[in-house]
Amino acid sequence: MYGFSEELAQRIRGTINIEGADVGGIGGTLAGNALSMAAMRATLENVLTAEAYDRNIALAKRFCDGVESVIKEHNLPWIVKHLGCRT
């Protein structure tokens, strides 16, 4: 129950392709297989480490600063969003 009318539920159902609904890579039939679990463990242990985040956050800041300097230099009506290692 999502808190909307049956009419709206029917309209939503009419727009969703159920066969392609699980394409996000999270969950689904194959998410718990041995290869997926091994890949997840390797990623958490070896890739998503504090050291990697420290390095990537510094690189993201450097990138962000560079893009912002070009925006300022050319007086462009743009902005850069920066959160952690995402820019």
Image: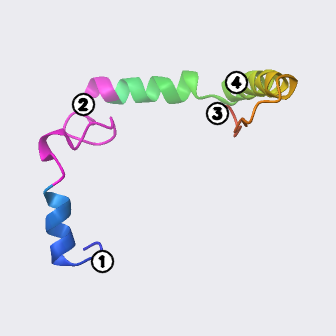
Cα–Cα span, label 1 and label 2: 34 Å
SS for callout 3: loop
Q: Which residue is mark 4?
A: 56
Q: In which quadrant will I find the C terminus?
A: top right
User: Closer to the camera, 59 or 7?
Assistant: 7
User: Is 83 rendered above or below residue 72?
Assistant: below
**Residue 8 position within the rendered picture, expressed as x and y whole percent measured from the top left:** 21, 71
Q: Say few, some or many: other residues with alpha carbon within 10 Å of mark 4 (under 14 / 14 to 19 / 20 or more).
A: some
Horizontal arrangement in the rendering, residue 65 relative to residue 5 (left or right): right
Q: Quadrant of residue 37?
A: top left
3 or 4: mark nearer the eye: 3
For label 2, the crowd category at 10 Å Cα-Cα, with few meaning under 14, some 14 to 19 and many 20 or more, is: few
Quarter of the image for residue 70 reads top right
Q: Which residue is mark 3?
A: 86
Viewer-proximal residue, 53 or 82?
Answer: 82
Cα distance between the residues tagged 4 and 2: 30 Å
Residue at image location 22% in from the left, 78% down from the top: 5
